[in-house]
Each structure stands twice: as structure tokens, then as C-alpha cells.
Image (tube, rainbow, N blue to C red):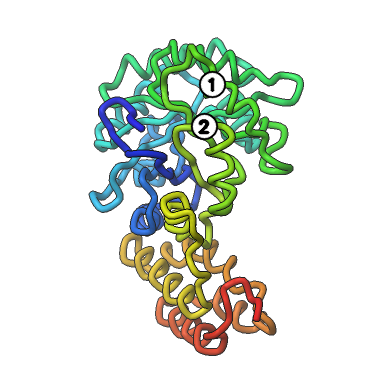
Amino acid sequence: MKIGQLDLGEMPLLLAPMEDVTDPSFRVFCKEQGADMMYTEFVSAEALVRNVNRSLRKLELIEAERPVGIQIYGNDIEKMVIAAQMAEAARPELIDLNFGCPVKKIAGKGSGSGLLRDIPKMLEITKAVVKAVKVPVTAKTRLGWDNESLVIEEVAEQLQDAGIQALCIHGRTKEQMYYGVADWTLIGKVKNNPRMHIPIIGNGDVDSPQKAKELIDRYQVDALMIGRASIGRPWIFREIKHYLTTGELLPQMSVKEQALLMDDIVRKSCDMIGERRGILHARRHLAIPFKNLPNIRPLRIQLLRAKTVTGISETLKLIGDKYADYPADGSE
């Protein structure tokens, strides 16, 4: 799959942009685990224009994570243009427009998926950003605002005409948030529309190697974007890639193997953004593994309360040693 001159190979796996998740350390770890394209946390155009430090830090990229896209959001055309130019100065491989975030503080203010209720402005923003930068511009959106306004087939053509070079579609409406089952039917219709010539990336409920292959085979998308399933389990990229290549599942990791990988995540996070911030970021990943192990609660609480890298490493070692022969899902 190619986005402009960027060649990501056949059926690439993309790490979705996720607030407070896809920081540089997690992006690098996912790259090591087989992800083909990384995305930053989504960045507010308003905050960039006001030079808010927390948002400016999101533009900091490192060579080890490339290729990487910076995703921006907002509903003011001029500010989105300025933000796109600021993002371009960080030298990403592409800039992605967030037309899909459903959370109230973003969509409720007319940004993210809120623009699905103002398609003309969505298109104005897209045209203005495409004109303002030299790197490829892509977009991520949803099926529509709700089930009564499933506009993605028309919007996909309009965004292509506005100049985007790839489109990622999440198979839910704004109103669905992240609940229920993602509906890929309309994603498939967009992909099979003979008028569409840009890559179509599918997103939503890609949570196992088998599911990934099923969605690819059924809907013929050009790439998969993986979001929530990578939290606490970034090796899902390696698992999916192996299955797509060989048709075989990788052996399930033991708790000890998983504990060692989680330790690596924590250390990378702390090395890159400092111990305090690194631990805060890593906790969302630490909260997910091991939860199905018998009598794990005391050690899990200890793990999540640890305030130093050393404390986390020691607790992970205790978990790994105690449950060394258990598969990671907790079954005996």
C-alpha cells in the first residue's frame, strides 16, 4: 500500500492514534512488535496555535518510530492550517485529519466526529490543509453521526476529491462511541466503489489474528488500523503479521514472557519521558495483563501502585516467577 510516495508494503498494520496511549515510547515498542505505521496522540489545533507545551510535546518524533503520522483536530479552518504547518515542521511522513473522535469534549464542540454534522466545513478544512502542506494528508472518520445519517460512502468520495491520499474508516457511528460491534459493511462498500482510488484502511474490533484475516478477506481493505486491542498487548501486531504470512498462530506467551515484555515497555517509557510520566503512561498497559490469573489481586494492586521503575520491575518478576508456567490468559 502506498500513501503518496510512502510505501508501506502489502497489508500493513497501523497503530491508531490514541490520547494518552500512543506516546513515543509505546510507538517505538509497537514498531518493534511489527506495526508498519505509527500515529501520534491526536493534537488540538487550537492548543498548537496557542503554543501549549503539552500539545507541542506531541510533535516530538524520533527516528526509531518512523514512519509516523501526526494527527490533528479542530473545526477552525485557519487554525487547522497553521497547526498542519507546525506539524509538518516536525517532519512526519504524513498529516492525518481527525474527523472521527467521538468523545464529548471534542465532538460536542464541532471537532472530530462532530464534523460529520457539518460536511461542508469538513471539506473546507481538508482542502485548506492539503493546499498548505507538502506531505501527504490523510483522514480518519466514522460511518456517520448516527444510524440515521450513515454518510460515509458520499463523504469518502468528497474527501478524496478534496485531496486526501488515504482514508481510515472506523466501523461505528459517533453515537455508538466504542460500544457494540463494529460494522464493516460500509467500509467494504467504500473500498469496492470503482470511483475510489486512494487506499482504504479498516478500523474497529481488530482484536485477534483470526479476526484480522477474516476482515481482510471479506472486505478487501488495503490496511488495518489497530487501536484498543494494542493497549496492554502491543505484540498483537506480531501475532497478526505472523498469522497473515504463515496461516499459523504463534504459540501463546507464558506469563513470564509477558511480564518481561511489560517490563521493557515501562523502561522504554521512563527512559523517553521521565520516570514519573513514564509510569503514569505505562499503568494503562500494566492494568490489562494478568487480570485472569488466580489469586493475582494483591500482586496486581502492588504493580499498579508502584511509583518507581525498580518497584514495577520487582513486582513483574514476582508475577513472572509465581505464574511462570501459566499461559498469559490465565488458563492452566
Foreground: 200 or 77?
200
Question: Looking at the picture, which amino acid does disc 2 mark?
Answer: Gln
The residue positioned 57% from the left and 54% from the top of the image is 208
Q: Residue 122: x and y, percent?
A: 52, 17
- Disc number for residue 220: 2
Q: Secondary structure at mark 2?
A: loop
Compared with 323, 276 (above or below) is above
Q: Secondary structure at mark 1?
A: loop
In the rendered image, which quarter is residue 330 located in?
bottom right
- Residue 281 appears in the rendering: yes
Compared with 133, 26 (above or below) is below
Compared with 324, 277 (above or below) is above
Q: Residue 249: x and y, percent?
A: 51, 61
The residue positioned 66% from the left and 38% from the top of the image is 182
Question: Looking at the picture, which amino acid does disc 1 mark?
Answer: Asn
Horizontal side, residue 157 vs residue 54: left or right:
right
Question: Furthest residue to the right?
Answer: 148
Question: Furthest residue to the front?
Answer: 247
| Residue designated by label 1 | 192
The residue positioned 32% from the left and 61% from the top of the image is 272
Horizontal side, residue 15 vs residue 133: left or right:
right
In the rendered image, which quarter is residue 296 located in?
bottom right
Horizontal side, residue 167 vs residue 6: left or right:
right
Q: Residue 68: x and y, percent?
A: 33, 41
Q: Residue 184: x and y, percent?
A: 63, 33
- Residue 79 appears in the rendering: no
The residue positioned 51% from the left and 46% from the top of the image is 226
Check whether the beta carbons of the residues at disc 2 and disc 1 lie within 8 A of each other. Answer: yes
Foreground: 68 or 186?
186
Neighbours of disc 2 within 10 Å: few (<14), some (14-19), many (20+): some
Of the numbered discs 2 and 1, the one sitting upstream in the chain is: 1
